[in-house]
Amino acid sequence: MDCRSCQSLLSAYVDDQLVATDARRLHVHLSGCSDCSAELNLLLGTLQLLRSLPRPRPTADPWEAIAFTLRREGLVRPWYRRARPLGVAAAAAVVIVAGSYVIWRPTSQSASLEAYWRQHAIFAAQEAPALSTGAPSLDAIEATYQLEGDDR
Amino acid sequence: MTAGRWFLALSVLTAPWSPPALAQPTFAELARAGQLPYRGELVINGRTIVRVSHGGPGLQRQEVLAPPDLAGELVVDNGQTRWHYSPRTMRVDLAPSSYGLRRPEHNQHLLERNFHLVVIRSEPVAGRPATEIELRPRYAGRNSQRLWIDAATGLPLKVQRLSPRGVVLETSEFRHLEPHATIGRSEFEFALPPRARVTSSVQVLAMGRSLADLHMPVPFPIRMPGYLPAGFDVMDVQIFERGGVRSVHWRLSDGLDMLSLFQTAREHEAPRPAGAQVVTLPHVATGFMVDHGPERMLCWQTGAGSFSLVGDLGPDELERIADSTSP
């Protein structure tokens, strides 16, 4: 296999799309070709970079952010400036009822898949130290960011 | 020079050359080398550069130097506590180290039972003579690992993880290594940076090698699968809590690959993320599968609780394990 054929197969290779015979031919070439090995490392590095990019999350309350901007620009007035006395009383009643519900509602938490990914990644990084180079788990670092995002 | 000496010299020069015999490392030697102190710089997948210090059993320090978006991430483990400092969030995540639960002899037994150690060739790494070896799985469908073992110390200078089809999943390689480095104990004690906050994303409540070691009740019946893939053993078990949800974490290994089985109460079922694939499990109704690089997570429910299984085995194996948790 020459460099051109090798490099044309690298993308399929990292996607695990090559049949075993092609993968073996590729290995033979890669073991003797520093250029193609460097190309493979670059590709793996790029994939790692893509995996490490933060996943976009909407703000906790997108409407609140939009409303804040509208108020700041003077396009709308805050509800408490528009409210009349009867409206204020009604709003206060709603707040009391809703607050009571928040305090007394039954809990229904769910398991965090991000926490599971992270705990698994830490476990995988800590085991078999004799057979590793002591590399930290980048997956664990990324998963910790995901959890911290949840906490904010 | 006499004719006899000429003949001797010529016969030496013309004798067929044979390469020096390759060292044949053993699993026991690899395990012993893993106890050596060293300091060095690692390159992971050609992009991430990490400074690592290993001070002997249980003492680890790893600091990411590049790329810029990860630089400064620091993990310190002194065998009792694990700190992870993130300069971007100014947070220190604190957790108990699981070093005390490790059983190197058990791990060596798993490796000998589940993998063939094959010597490939001599090839230097980072300017040091090394022997390339491969750990080939005895069971089909498992990952393998290539290691370049330092001839002088037995330390792995380069490690590649390969999928069952031979695709390189990850490469880490020393670009500089200082074996037998003298590293002070203070390097493995974490000094809190100014203004950093200490948090615990997950509260580990108990850990042990078996449930009997934990002495910690959980509000649901703990259920282990009736089927485990060939070669896998339970390494240890933890109970942890996050956001008021208590989970049991079984940690399994075949010596190289790890599987995690999480169980929590039925009412704490994990929400199905967008893009998750629904799978049908004959004895457990339905579940869903989420891919994450080479690894995947399968989540399902039985009468005993909500389960999640993480690992890089094939989907069929994960589904078979899940199905064997039916009452």
Image: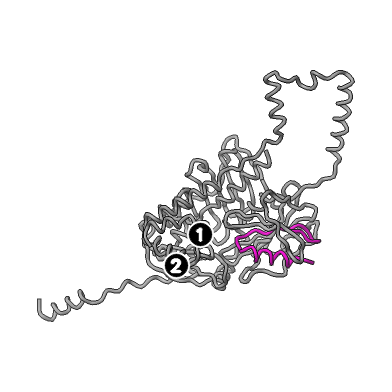
> Where is mark 1, residue-wise?
A132
Membership of B304 in magenta stretch: yes
Q: Is residue B4 above or below residue B323?
A: below
- Rendered location of residue A38, percent (x, y): 40, 53
Membership of A22 in magenta stretch: no
Specify the amino acid type for callout 1. Ser
- The residue shown at (67%, 35%) is A59
Left/right of residue B137 with respect to residue A65 in the rendered view:
left
- Rendered location of residue B256, percent (x, y): 56, 64
Query: Which chain's residue wears label 1?
Result: A
Query: Which chain's residue wears label 2?
Result: B
> Where is mark 2, residue-wise?
B133
- The residue shown at (59%, 42%) is A54
- Per the model, the C-alpha gap separating discs 1 and 2 is 13 Å
* Residues packed near mark 1 inside 10 Å, few (<14), some (14 to 19) or many (20 plus): many
Is residue B129 visible in the rendered structure shown here?
A: yes
As helix, strand or loop, the secondary structure at mark 1 comes to loop
Residue B192 sits in which quadrant? top right
Is residue B249 visible in the rendered structure shown here?
A: no
Specify the amino acid type for callout 2. Ile
Left/right of residue B295 with respect to residue B220 in the rendered view:
left
The residue segment tinted magenta is: B300-327
Question: Which quadrant is the N terminus of chain B positioned in?
Answer: bottom left
